[in-house]
Amino acid sequence: MEGFGSWSVLTTNFILCLYIALGGVTLSAILHLVNGKWRFVVRNLACSLAVMFPVAFVLMIVLLANGENTFQWLAQAREASAHGGGGHHLPGWHNYAFLATRQIVGFFVVAGLYGLFIKLQHQATIDDSYPAQRRFRNIALVIPGIYVLYGTMIAWDYEMTMIPNWHSASYSVYHFVSNFHFFLAFFAFFLFMLNKSGKLTKEMPSFVFNHLAQMMLAFTILWTYFFFTQYLIMWYGRLPEEIFRFRNMMENGLAPIWWTFVTLKFIIPFCSYIFAVNRHTPSIIATISVGIMVGTWLERYTWISGSVDPKFYHLPMTSMFDIAVTVLVIGVAIAAMRWSLTRFGLMRA
């Protein structure tokens, strides 16, 4: 438990790496289903981000192997058992063998289906026959549902149930809406930097950034709605066993981080993107995107680390472990994405 704050940093990095991998294919599937014409410009670049699946898998195995350093409720259960308490009562969902199994099996199922989507998308590009187009449409119909189901499991295991018996009926949708918000910001910044470097084999049209900005505005509003929906239900209903988690984040040592991510994920994007000129200026979009990415990282860390007593966590990036592991993950992620873009001919070496 002593190092829970630092391991929360690694958990946060894992979740965001995972959602970069999930977001690219999910965005491509959604654009296909709604017949978005700009999908042809971005879908290969978006799907290239599936290279982040192996990075996320390695991080997941490290987190699962570290047991109570990752899942603080496991430490509480073992401590209670060691003191003759017969073990800390936990719901069946907290069975650790079951948790590790569902995480690993779920990861491979999702990665396999997402890989199949990429394969069928490529086949549909070179084969305009009805069977090829039908197979691609069918897998595209499945992807959003898989994103929701898998995102729910990730939300429950790594965030919501960090405090046993704490729950929110809307937490899972709040979680994956927030992380898709993050992905849109990441993808806009990703495209901006690639386009600015001049290494893209095809220049990125400016209207793509406008479309992404409009989607970010929509998800900014959605994220705000889902966050305060669950808060208001617990506050207005006077549910002390539920609202205390929000108060730990909003009123104690994590309060500066809470206000920071609310500013970066809601106040700045909303006040900027309501003006059309900002949604048509790629440099402004890229700047706001950086804020959303940082805000989401802080949000994930707050939910995870805030599940324990303040003495067990610290402000992020105030220890060498936090900095070293984050820099390492970013470095590996950049190398993996460069390899994927070059391998599929999307970027000049």
Image: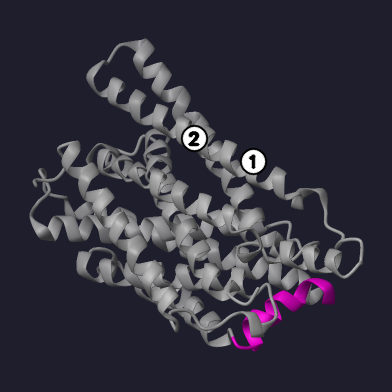
Query: Of discs 2 and 1, which sits in the foreground?
Result: 1
Q: Is residue 126 above or below residue 49?
A: above
Q: Residue at x 35, y 11 (%)?
A: 130
Asked if the stretch drawn in magenta spans residue 323, the answer is: no
Q: Residue at x 40, y 52 (%)?
A: 20
Element class at badge 1: helix
- Kindly identify which residue carries mark 1: 102
Q: Is residue 310 above or below residue 297?
A: below
Q: Residues within 10 Å of mark 2 (few under 14, many from 20)?
A: many
- Kindly identify which residue carries mark 2: 143
Towards the viewer: 244 or 68: 68
Q: Residues within 10 Å of mark 1 (few under 14, many from 20)?
A: some
Residue 123 in percent (x, y) is at: 29, 20
Which residue is outermost to the right?
85
Residue 189 can be seen, yes or no? yes
Quadrant position of the N terminus in the picture: bottom right
Q: Which mark is residue 14?
A: none
The answer to whether 275 appears left or right of 67 in the picture is left
Towards the viewer: 337 or 267: 337
Main secondary structure type of the part rendered in magenta: helix
Residue 341 in percent (x, y) is at: 20, 44
Element class at badge 2: helix
Q: Is residue 261 above or below residue 189?
A: below
Towards the viewer: 344 or 127: 344
Q: Amino acid at mark 2?
A: Ile
Magenta range: 240-253
Q: Earlier in the sequence, mark 2 or mark 1?
A: 1
Residue 321 in percent (x, y) is at: 43, 74
